[in-house]
Protein backbone atom coordinates (compact mmCIF):
# COMPACT_ATOMS: atom_id res chain seq x y z
CA UNK A 1 0.00 0.00 0.00
CA UNK A 2 1.34 3.44 -0.91
CA UNK A 3 2.33 5.73 1.95
CA UNK A 4 -0.18 8.40 2.90
CA UNK A 5 2.63 10.91 3.44
CA UNK A 6 5.75 11.30 1.29
CA UNK A 7 8.71 13.33 2.58
CA UNK A 8 12.41 13.47 1.86
CA UNK A 9 15.08 11.52 3.65
CA UNK A 10 16.37 14.59 5.50
CA UNK A 11 12.89 15.26 6.92
CA UNK A 12 12.57 11.69 8.18
CA UNK A 13 15.96 11.99 9.91
CA UNK A 14 14.94 15.32 11.42
CA UNK A 15 11.75 13.82 12.82
CA UNK A 16 13.65 10.83 14.24
CA UNK A 17 16.24 13.08 15.94
CA UNK A 18 13.54 15.34 17.35
CA UNK A 19 11.68 12.28 18.67
CA UNK A 20 14.79 11.20 20.59
CA UNK A 21 15.82 14.60 21.94
CA UNK A 22 12.59 16.39 22.82
CA UNK A 23 11.25 16.41 26.39
CA UNK A 24 7.80 17.52 25.26
CA UNK A 25 5.48 14.51 25.23
CA UNK A 26 3.12 16.12 22.73
CA UNK A 27 5.93 16.85 20.26
CA UNK A 28 7.14 13.26 20.66
CA UNK A 29 3.67 11.89 19.84
CA UNK A 30 3.44 14.07 16.73
CA UNK A 31 6.84 12.89 15.53
CA UNK A 32 6.01 9.23 16.03
CA UNK A 33 2.64 9.50 14.29
CA UNK A 34 4.28 11.18 11.31
CA UNK A 35 7.08 8.59 11.20
CA UNK A 36 4.61 5.71 11.23
CA UNK A 37 2.49 7.29 8.50
CA UNK A 38 5.61 7.97 6.40
CA UNK A 39 6.56 4.28 6.77
CA UNK A 40 3.24 3.28 5.19
CA UNK A 41 0.93 2.75 8.17
CA UNK A 42 -2.54 4.24 8.13
CA UNK A 43 -3.38 7.11 10.43
CA UNK A 44 -5.82 4.87 12.32
CA UNK A 45 -3.14 2.20 12.86
CA UNK A 46 -0.59 4.80 13.99
CA UNK A 47 -3.05 6.24 16.51
CA UNK A 48 -3.93 2.80 17.85
CA UNK A 49 -0.25 1.88 18.24
CA UNK A 50 0.51 5.07 20.18
CA UNK A 51 -2.65 5.01 22.28
CA UNK A 52 -4.16 8.28 21.05
CA UNK A 53 -7.42 9.16 19.30
CA UNK A 54 -7.59 8.62 15.51
CA UNK A 55 -8.72 12.23 15.12
CA UNK A 56 -5.38 13.30 16.61
CA UNK A 57 -3.46 11.42 13.93
CA UNK A 58 -5.65 12.85 11.15
CA UNK A 59 -5.15 16.37 12.48
CA UNK A 60 -1.36 16.02 12.81
CA UNK A 61 -0.93 14.64 9.29
CA UNK A 62 -3.19 17.34 7.81
CA UNK A 63 -1.24 20.08 9.61
CA UNK A 64 2.07 18.62 8.45
CA UNK A 65 0.90 18.60 4.84
CA UNK A 66 -0.18 22.23 5.15
CA UNK A 67 2.61 23.73 7.26
CA UNK A 68 5.57 21.34 7.05
CA UNK A 69 7.98 20.96 9.98
CA UNK A 70 6.36 23.77 11.94
CA UNK A 71 3.25 21.61 12.43
CA UNK A 72 5.19 19.39 14.85
CA UNK A 73 5.36 22.16 17.45
CA UNK A 74 2.58 23.77 19.45
CA UNK A 75 0.97 26.53 17.44
CA UNK A 76 0.73 28.66 20.59
CA UNK A 77 4.51 29.12 20.63
CA UNK A 78 4.02 32.14 18.35
CA UNK A 79 1.46 33.81 20.58
CA UNK A 80 4.07 36.21 21.93
CA UNK A 81 5.80 36.46 25.31
CA UNK A 82 4.87 33.96 27.99
CA UNK A 83 2.49 35.19 30.66
CA UNK A 84 4.38 33.33 33.38
CA UNK A 85 8.01 34.39 33.02
CA UNK A 86 10.93 34.19 35.43
CA UNK A 87 9.73 37.20 37.43
CA UNK A 88 6.27 35.71 37.88
CA UNK A 89 7.77 32.37 38.93
CA UNK A 90 9.90 34.15 41.54
CA UNK A 91 6.76 35.91 42.75
CA UNK A 92 4.91 32.58 43.06
CA UNK A 93 7.77 31.17 45.15
CA UNK A 94 7.59 34.22 47.41
CA UNK A 95 3.83 33.79 47.84
CA UNK A 96 4.22 30.13 48.73
CA UNK A 97 6.66 30.97 51.51
CA UNK A 98 3.68 32.58 53.26
CA UNK A 99 0.26 31.24 54.21
CA UNK A 100 -3.15 32.35 52.87
CA UNK A 101 -3.84 33.92 56.25
CA UNK A 102 -1.20 36.55 55.52
CA UNK A 103 -3.25 37.60 52.49
CA UNK A 104 -6.53 37.91 54.37
CA UNK A 105 -7.95 34.39 53.96
CA UNK A 106 -9.00 32.25 56.96
CA UNK A 107 -7.61 28.86 55.86
CA UNK A 108 -3.95 28.03 56.65
CA UNK A 109 -3.15 25.92 53.56
CA UNK A 110 -3.11 26.62 49.84
CA UNK A 111 -5.41 25.39 47.10
CA UNK A 112 -4.88 25.99 43.39
CA UNK A 113 -7.93 28.25 43.19
CA UNK A 114 -6.84 30.28 46.21
CA UNK A 115 -3.28 30.56 44.94
CA UNK A 116 -4.54 31.74 41.55
CA UNK A 117 -6.57 34.49 43.28
CA UNK A 118 -3.55 35.69 45.24
CA UNK A 119 -1.38 35.67 42.10
CA UNK A 120 -4.02 37.77 40.37
CA UNK A 121 -4.13 40.26 43.27
CA UNK A 122 -0.41 40.46 44.06
CA UNK A 123 1.30 39.84 40.70
CA UNK A 124 -1.55 41.05 38.47
CA UNK A 125 -1.30 37.92 36.32
CA UNK A 126 -4.43 35.93 35.54
CA UNK A 127 -3.79 32.17 35.66
CA UNK A 128 -6.48 29.48 35.85
CA UNK A 129 -6.27 26.72 38.42
CA UNK A 130 -5.78 24.07 35.72
CA UNK A 131 -2.90 25.96 34.09
CA UNK A 132 -1.39 26.82 37.46
CA UNK A 133 -0.70 23.13 38.08
CA UNK A 134 1.44 23.06 34.91
CA UNK A 135 3.29 26.13 36.15
CA UNK A 136 4.00 24.62 39.57
CA UNK A 137 5.40 21.32 38.30
CA UNK A 138 8.63 22.79 36.83
CA UNK A 139 9.03 24.73 40.08
CA UNK A 140 8.98 21.35 41.91
CA UNK A 141 6.08 22.46 44.09
CA UNK A 142 4.58 19.31 45.59
CA UNK A 143 1.13 18.49 46.96
CA UNK A 144 1.78 17.18 50.44
CA UNK A 145 0.45 17.17 53.96
CA UNK A 146 1.19 20.05 56.30
CA UNK A 147 2.86 19.29 59.63
CA UNK A 148 1.05 20.67 62.69
CA UNK A 149 3.00 22.19 65.55
CA UNK A 150 2.15 23.62 68.95
CA UNK A 151 3.04 27.20 69.84
CA UNK A 152 4.31 27.53 73.39
CA UNK A 153 2.18 30.10 75.25
CA UNK A 154 5.19 31.30 77.27
CA UNK A 155 7.44 34.12 76.16
CA UNK A 156 10.95 33.18 75.07
CA UNK A 157 12.63 34.66 78.18
CA UNK A 158 10.30 32.78 80.53
CA UNK A 159 10.80 29.52 78.64
CA UNK A 160 14.60 29.82 78.73
CA UNK A 161 14.57 30.66 82.44
CA UNK A 162 12.31 27.70 83.20
CA UNK A 163 14.55 25.25 81.36
CA UNK A 164 17.63 26.65 83.11
CA UNK A 165 16.00 26.23 86.53
CA UNK A 166 15.10 22.60 85.76
CA UNK A 167 18.69 21.89 84.74
CA UNK A 168 19.99 23.44 87.96
CA UNK A 169 17.52 21.36 89.96
CA UNK A 170 18.73 18.18 88.23
CA UNK A 171 22.36 19.09 88.85
CA UNK A 172 21.77 19.57 92.61
CA UNK A 173 20.20 16.13 93.08
CA UNK A 174 21.41 14.51 96.32
CA UNK A 175 22.91 11.05 96.39
CA UNK A 176 20.27 8.45 95.74
CA UNK A 177 17.87 10.97 94.24
CA UNK A 178 16.21 10.41 90.88
CA UNK A 179 15.40 12.97 88.18
CA UNK A 180 13.09 11.85 85.41
CA UNK A 181 11.22 13.32 82.44
CA UNK A 182 7.66 12.01 82.42
CA UNK A 183 4.84 12.27 79.93
CA UNK A 184 1.84 10.37 78.59
CA UNK A 185 0.54 9.64 75.11
CA UNK A 186 -2.75 8.49 73.57
CA UNK A 187 -2.62 5.77 70.90
CA UNK A 188 -5.48 5.54 68.40
CA UNK A 189 -5.78 2.14 66.72
CA UNK A 190 -7.99 3.51 63.91
CA UNK A 191 -5.55 4.26 61.15
CA UNK A 192 -5.22 7.84 59.94
CA UNK A 193 -6.35 8.29 56.33
CA UNK A 194 -4.40 10.87 54.38
CA UNK A 195 -4.62 12.08 50.80
CA UNK A 196 -4.06 9.77 47.86
CA UNK A 197 -3.96 9.82 44.06
CA UNK A 198 -7.00 8.07 42.61
CA UNK A 199 -8.36 7.40 39.15
CA UNK A 200 -11.33 9.49 37.97
CA UNK A 201 -14.67 8.10 39.16
CA UNK A 202 -13.10 5.86 41.82
CA UNK A 203 -12.47 6.19 45.53
CA UNK A 204 -9.87 4.26 47.48
CA UNK A 205 -11.20 1.95 50.21
CA UNK A 206 -9.07 1.39 53.30
CA UNK A 207 -9.93 -1.29 55.86
CA UNK A 208 -10.34 0.02 59.41
CA UNK A 209 -11.19 -1.81 62.66
CA UNK A 210 -14.53 0.01 62.86
CA UNK A 211 -15.01 1.61 66.25
CA UNK A 212 -11.89 3.42 67.28
CA UNK A 213 -9.94 1.83 70.11
CA UNK A 214 -7.47 3.70 72.27
CA UNK A 215 -4.53 2.77 74.44
CA UNK A 216 -2.70 5.00 76.85
CA UNK A 217 0.99 4.97 77.71
CA UNK A 218 2.68 6.77 80.59
CA UNK A 219 6.45 6.76 80.87
CA UNK A 220 9.40 8.25 82.72
CA UNK A 221 12.95 8.66 81.35
CA UNK A 222 16.02 8.90 83.60
CA UNK A 223 18.63 10.91 81.62
CA UNK A 224 21.47 10.12 84.06
CA UNK A 225 21.09 6.34 83.85
CA UNK A 226 19.42 6.41 80.40
CA UNK A 227 16.57 4.20 81.57
CA UNK A 228 12.96 4.31 80.34
CA UNK A 229 10.05 2.94 82.35
CA UNK A 230 6.52 2.89 80.95
CA UNK A 231 3.13 1.38 81.68
CA UNK A 232 0.09 0.74 79.47
CA UNK A 233 -3.57 1.15 80.35
CA UNK A 234 -6.98 1.14 78.72
CA UNK A 235 -8.08 4.31 80.51
CA UNK A 236 -6.41 7.63 81.28
CA UNK A 237 -6.76 7.48 85.05
CA UNK A 238 -4.73 8.72 88.03
CA UNK A 239 -3.35 5.22 88.73
CA UNK A 240 -1.70 5.23 85.27
Image (spheres, rainbow, N blue to C red):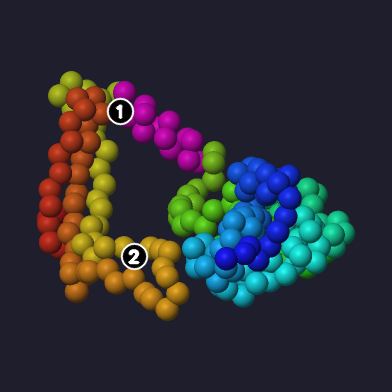
Q: Which residue has dot 1 on it?
A: 170
Looking at the image, do the residues carrying marks 2 and 1 touch, with CB atoms under 8 Å apart? no
Please state the horizontal and vertical placement of residue 232, each as a whole percent of the image.
Answer: 12, 52
Toward the viewer: 85 or 74? 74
Q: Quadrant of the N terminus?
A: bottom right
Please state the horizontal and vertical placement of residue 96, each as a whole percent of the image.
Answer: 65, 54
Q: Residue at x 65, y 66 (%)?
A: 4
Element under disc 1: helix
Element under disc 2: loop
Asked if residue 177 shows in the view, the reply is yes
Question: Does the magenta portion include 160?
Answer: yes
Q: Quadrant of residue 237?
A: bottom left
In the displayed image of the protein, which residue is found farthest to the front?
1
Q: Quadrant of residue 193?
A: bottom left
Q: Specify whether 122 is left or right of 113.
A: right
Magenta segment, which residues?
158-171
Crowd class of label 2 (few under 14; some 14 to 19; many from 20; radius 10 Å): few
Q: Residue at x 86, y 56 (%)?
A: 81
Please state the horizontal and vertical placement of residue 140, each as a whole percent of the image.
Answer: 59, 48
Toward the viewer: 158 or 145? 145
Q: Which residue has dot 2 on it?
A: 193
Q: Which mark is residue 236?
A: none
Q: Main secondary structure of the magenta part?
A: helix
Q: Is residue 163 above or below residue 123?
A: above
Toward the viewer: 219 or 158? 219
Amino acid sequence: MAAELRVGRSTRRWLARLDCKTRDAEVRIRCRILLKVIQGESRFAAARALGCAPSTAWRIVARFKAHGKGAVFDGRCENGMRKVDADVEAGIRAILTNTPQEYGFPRPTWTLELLARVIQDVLEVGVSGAHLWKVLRPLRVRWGAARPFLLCPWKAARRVARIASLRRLAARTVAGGVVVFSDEVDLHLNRKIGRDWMLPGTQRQILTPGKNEKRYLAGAYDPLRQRLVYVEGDRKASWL
